[in-house]
Amino acid sequence: MKGALRANTDDNESGRCFGGTHRDRPGMRYRDGMLRRFSAWIEETAAARVALPFVSAALLIGGALMIALSLGGSPAAPAPSPTVASARADLEKALAAAQAYLGDQQVPSFEGFNPKSADGVDASLTWNRAETASEGVVTIRVAGERNLLVVSKDAMGVYCIVTNVTGGDTRGTQDAQTSAECTGGW
């Protein structure tokens, strides 16, 4: 019976007694060694359990930092230029002012929408009529019966919006002189 385990026998050559219950049996030497190793392992893990809260806190803080960076971008990333947001926001406000002007007309038309009438609708913007776009100014280029073209400029470029009396809008990124030239979107 080579290789077979023999439990609870006194004639076990290896000196191991699996399942023995008395100290006078030869297998107890093996059990005592296992008990010492198990006790040593418990003591080692007890030291690890003391460190566990600190490791857990470090992991939580690291995870929160990773989430914050993924949601908010890199702390080294430059913030968007306020002039870009400002130029586009000015054109959006100009579009709203033009639509309000259009709603006040008996016959829907942008004719008569000029810097003076635009200022009466939205005085928070600076309005003009000019050949070239100026930074911080909304330039009215075309104010016809059916279409309106407004242009504004900032440090990043020139933006334009064309709208018509039915409310369809087109956005572009050039100093458009005509409604057809305002293309490219933004």
Image (cartoon, rainbow, N blue to C red):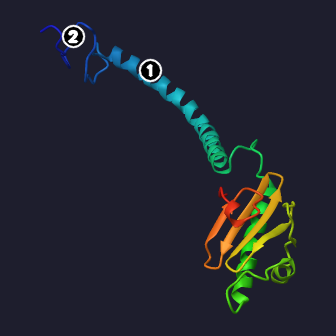
Mark carried by residue 12: 2
Quadrant containing the N terminus in the rendered view = top left
Res. 154 in view: yes
Q: Nearer the viewer, mark 1 or mark 2?
A: 1
The answer to whether 39 is drawn above or below residue 83 in the figure is: above
Q: Quadrant of residue 162?
A: bottom right
5 and 180: which is toward the camera = 180
The answer to whether 42 is drawn above or below residue 71 in the figure is: above
* Residue at left offset 65%, top offset 55%: 184
75 and 139: which is toward the camera = 139
| Element at label 1 | helix
- Across and down, in percent, residue 24 comes to 29, 16
Measure the alpha-carbon separation of dots 1 and 2. Answer: 23 Å
| Element at label 2 | loop
Mark carried by residue 27: none
- Across and down, in percent, residue 111 comes to 75, 82
N-term mark: 1 or 2: 2
The amino acid on which the numbered mark 1 sits, given as a three-letter code, is Arg
* Residue at left offset 53%, top offset 26%: 44
Left or right for 36, reference 27: right
22 and 155: which is toward the camera = 155
Q: Which residue is mark 1?
A: 37
Left or right for 131, reference 93: right
- Across and down, in percent, residue 6 comes to 18, 16
The answer to whether 60 is drawn above or below residue 124 in the figure is: above
